[in-house]
Image (spheres, rainbow, N blue to C red):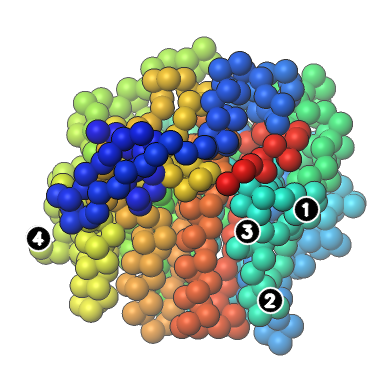
Amino acid sequence: MPFASGRNPVRRGIVVNLTAFGLVAWTLVAEADPIRDLQTAAIATNRAEFGHWGVNPAIYAQWGTHSNRLIPVYTFGTLNPQIPQGKWGPVDLRNYTGANSPYRSETQLKRIYGRLPTQTLNPDAEYFDQTNLYDLQMAGFANGKKYVFLIIFDGMDWQTTWSASIYKTQSIPYTEGRGKGLHFQDYTAGGTTQFGFMCTSPHNSGTRTDPNTQSVLNPGGTMFGGYNVECGGPNPWTPGSDPFYLISKSVQKEFQHAYTDSSSSATSMTAGIKTFNDGVNIDATGVPVSTIAHWAQDHGYAVGAVTSVPISHATPAAAYAHNVERDDYQDLTRDMVGLKSIMHPDKPLSGLDVLIGGGFGHSKTTDLVAATETEPAKHPQGTNFVPGNMYLTDVDLAAIDSRNGGKYVTAVRTSGVEGRKRLKEAATEAAANRQRLLGFYGNGKFSGHLPFATADGKYDPTIGRGGEKKIEAYEPADLVENPALSDMAGAAIEVLSRNPKGFWLMIEPGDVDWANHDDNIDSSIGAVLSGEAAVKLVTDWVEAHSNWKESLLIVTADHGHYFHLLKPEMLITPR
């Protein structure tokens, strides 16, 4: 029996019995769910008073992919003038904003993009570049930071955050700037927090590759990146003159710039370079580059990645792996767990010390991706694809398992076993024995991701851009047998913190992106709020076990979507 109600096993009008799991049965009478109702009605009519996705206010679900919007960045442990600067400069966001913005410098833009992008030099730029977040993390380590956290809310732009804050506070607490109401907006980290915004444009889009040879077939692709401030706007809350520009559809072709995908954008933050859309930690010509996790591991730190979506999706993969194709999932996972891969066939990478995420149960007999109007059919995993789980083959899972002589204590979703409890047990074992940890969870019916929370904290997604067939309805076991993202983050920290030198950890609330692709405001708000819990877990840990002189936290997103909130007061609903 499907249900969707958070960790209380209830749904409107039904009774769910979870006594088999040792939990209490609950009964739910009908409850109002205004945000769900707004979303359902908006899709039914394809029009909504409160807002729209795309450039046309008369069409609610016009646009279902990314944009080139400027993206908010919240940092903690960065505003501290007593920390020495070192070779990477100060651990301070102001090193890259305002007068120090690389978008004010022709030399710096050429260094970042490999050329001077058209219509991109801006002598008044306040924003910085995604690659500067790599610089900031390196500055942290160079200046004695012991713990570095990079939390990437995939797909969360300023408008997404604004919507979540309005719903959470039941007010309109701001209309510009950093904002307030969410934990990462309100938390001050002892006066060391800062706020800024960045450009996420890639090196290029339209690059074609061969996953079998790991080669780039047309370096430079079909459209270069950059940012035109007049067309796009000077900050995330001020629109530019050309709404079509941010989705690469401007009629002014000379102003056109590519918007990023998750692999290119995450690569900028973890490896400090611009690359093409679909590339993972390789440059625009296909040459692998080192990430901050590689550097940290080489210098004695522990490293890990945690995600609410499959373990080798673009963002977590960019923590560590190399590949010309972001959808070559099995090979990306091999890099992440220290096995031989298509990119490293002879000498594998060392592997992450902790990897926890989704992908469980998502099996296919082929990796074939059907042709679209713009793309031919392809096999992104190449000829070495192994039928079965799309992300982690049975053979590879067995090879890394400590019970078989591998390096990882494994916690895998198991029928009838509480996921949170099992993961905690595995983390305690791995930490006590100085072993690595792999957590593999998710729901195979829905591409292997964790269950999606909705705005009211329940797990009952309604219809989105994908239509009726794409609505997710969860079984009781889906919530019991899977941990939450915050559980995963806590398990990772337990293992990584046993390293006396310190650690680097990426955490990805990836469900924000999936919700925004679906043009689903209910799931979008719910994803932000569930990810917020993981941020609070990190700040609580720093408060209890460290301090902001030796810790650095960055909370941001890899790119934006294209939601426009026209009547924010409509997200203020009776409770």
Q: Position of residue 27 (x, y in %)?
A: 32, 43
Q: Which mark is residue 182?
A: 3
Q: Earlier in the sequence, mark 1 or mark 2?
A: 1
Q: Is residue 318 left or right of residue 44?
A: left
Q: Earlier in the sequence, mark 3 or mark 2?
A: 3
Viewer-closest of 54 and 408: 54
Q: Residue at x 75, y 35 (%)?
A: 567
Q: Earlier in the sequence, mark 4 or mark 2?
A: 2
Q: Tell me the SS state at disc 4.
A: helix
How many residues crowd around disc 1 within 10 Å: few (fewer than 14), some, or many (20 or more)? few
How many residues crowd around disc 3 within 10 Å: few (fewer than 14), some, or many (20 or more)? many
Return the residue at label 2.
Answer: 192
Above or below, comparing residue 217 to residue 166 in the picture: above
Circles 3, 4 touching at the beta carbon (< 8 Å): no
Return the residue at label 4.
Answer: 404
Return the residue at label 1.
Answer: 174
The amino acid beneath tag 1 is Tyr
Q: Position of residue 268 (x, y in %)?
A: 58, 51
